[in-house]
Amino acid sequence: MKAVQYRRVGAPPEVVEVEVPEPSPGQVLLKVDAAGMCHSDIAVMSWPEEEFPYSLPLTLGHEGIGTVSALGPGDHSCSEGDRMAVYGPWGCGLCHMCAQGKENYCDHAARLGIRPPGLGAPGAMAEYLLVDDERHLVPLGDLDPVEAAPLTDAGLTPYHAIKKSLPKLVGGSTAVVIGTGGLGHVAVQLLRALSPAKVIAVDVSEQKLELAHRVGAHHAVLSDESAPGKVRDLTAGFGAEVVFDFVGNSATTAIAAKCTRTEGDLAVVGIGGGTVPVGFGSMPFEVSVSAPYWGSRSELIEVLELARAGSVRVHVDSFGLDETPEVYERFHRGEIPGRAVIVP
């Protein structure tokens, strides 16, 4: 089968031929229908050799939708031909976090060497994907696989972050979304669907701000040194109850900190390496800062239900498997405003 692999640190990914995996007991083999491209992939391919945490070659892709092609020995609740979304943050399945469906925060995954597909384990940018356990599959139903693939991360991650702050997103409140590309434009839609909050989109790209407006943002602000002042002008000088930073570099975390009001929430979701200084006097009183990661399996089910109800839709551009290396270059240059999806 064809697969997109990162084979050598510092080199671009390649489309190669590999063996189709055989499912062992309890495992499920999917014929991949769609695989989303994520900035996390770019981050993985940007690590220097001395810090690289995974074995190479690595088949990329942690946002996967596929049709059950074969089942390993043992009893299964799914059947061949079922179309499934892949829950990506695999855990041990036994610890206290996993018992709550929070495999994204598994207590033992790192120690046991359990990795998500595309982030350590072979990923979904291939003609077939081996899933370790069917508990990591969620029925897709009638959703379009190309539009649904990014929901497994670009939908699940902002949903997890937003859900935690919903008690603060009441009538008259404001939410700021910094970075309105792949995850951010989904966050805007989720905020509009789940809360009455006023939504302010912040980005360096006029194209992405236009997309944010299209999907429901009330205001759009260019991301520069004047952005915090503009946000405060739009909030009677107080700042926002909740700020979501989907970029997470040093420039955006500085903006995020200046946009958050007293008793507000600041979620740094992006993996740009920025930090937020927390201490008495460094921020408004009682601001809570978090760094959420992915989401729970039950939250993925909820995201898919929101998509099924028409409350959220990912802006996607689809490409063939052989185009993937070139698409990664375009994605890295910021030329794809929403989400790129690979269709084997």
Image (cartoon, rainbow, N blue to C red):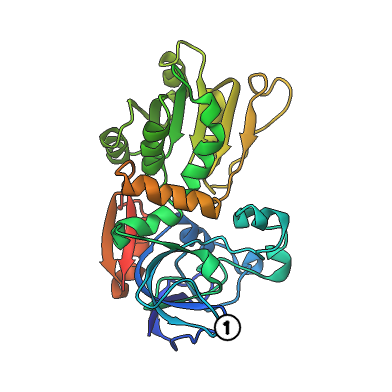
Q: Using the rendered view, name the quadrant where residue 283 is placed.
A: top right
**Residue 91 seen in this snapshot:** yes
Along the viewing direction, whichever of 55 and 45 lies nearer the viewer: 55
Crowding at dot 1, Cα within 10 Å, few <14 / some 14-19 / many 20+, comes out as few
Measured as percent of width and height from the top left, residue 183 is found at 42, 46
Quick one: 260 or 304, which is closer to the camera?
A: 304
What number of labels is visible?
1
Q: Residue at x 38, y 85 (%)?
A: 1
222 lies left or right of 108? left
Residue 76 picture location, percent across and down: 51, 75
Q: Nearer the viewer, residue 152 or 306?
A: 306
For the C terminus, the quadrant is bottom left
Q: Residue at x 54, y 27 (%)?
A: 167
Indicate left or right for 113 with 46 as reference: right
Residue 323: % across, % down:
29, 71
The reply, left or right, for residue 8 in relation to residue 289 is left
Q: Residue at x 47, y 43 (%)?
A: 159
Figure check: 189 above or below 147: above
Q: Quadrant of residue 52?
A: bottom right
Secondary structure beneath label 1? loop
Q: Does residue 251 appear in this view?
A: no
Q: Is residue 136 above or below residue 180?
A: below
Amino acid type of the residue that numbered disc 1 sits on in the rendered structure = Pro
Residue highlighted by disc 1: 25
Give coordinates of residue 72: x percent, y percent: 52, 83
